[in-house]
Image: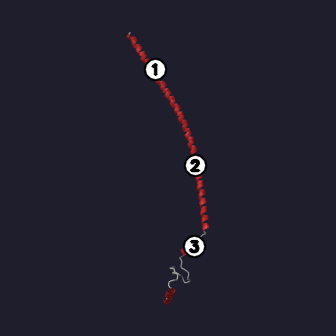
Amino acid sequence: MSGNAALTSAKNKRSAGGSQPPVSSTPVNRNGQPNAPNAQNAPNANLQHPLQILYVHDQMLKKHDEELQTLITINNEDKSELNNDLIKKINSLEKEVVDLKKEIIKVMAFAMDTSIQLSEVKKNQVAAASAASAASAE
């Protein structure tokens, strides 16, 4: 500011009595418009209406929901296939366990019969030995 402009400004401030609105601290160019960096003007040029922003956001959410539902469906199909396979395996294992139980019962019955026959053979041998010793003593 030149000296005259500073004096005029000071006089105007005093005569207004401080009722003048405060002067902004934004720098002013020669045209009287505030200087603003280009970075501040750029976002304002790309501003969209809030409803447009909401619409775009809603479309993105719908797209993500569809993708999520697709993934859930695929996951459930995989689980159902896995469950079917597991059920088949469990059923076959149950059949094998039943068959093994039958075989074990057969082996146990055979072992018991063998044991009974062995004890009868021993009894007969003891009876025969005692009869032979009684006959030889006479």
Placement of 82 over or under 101, stated as above or below: below
**Disc 1 marks which amino acid?**
Glu
Q: Residue furthest left?
A: 137
| Residue in view at x 60 percent, y 65 percent | 54
Which residue in the structure is indicated by mark 3?
44
Alpha carbons under labels 3 and 2: distance apart: 50 Å
The mark that comes first in sequence, 2 or 1, is 2
Nearest the eye: 50 or 123: 50
Residue 65, percent from left and from top: 59, 57
Q: Quadrant of residue 43?
A: bottom right
Which residue in the structure is indicated by mark 2?
78
Placement of 79 over or under 58, stated as above or below: above
Alpha carbons under labels 2 and 1: distance apart: 63 Å
Relative to 64, is 114 on the left or the right?
left
**Quick check: marks 3 and 2 in contact, CB under 8 Å?**
no
Residue density around tag 2, few if under 14, some if 14–19, many if 20 or more, within 10 Å:
few
The mark that comes first in sequence, 3 or 2, is 3
Which residue in the structure is indicated by mark 1?
120
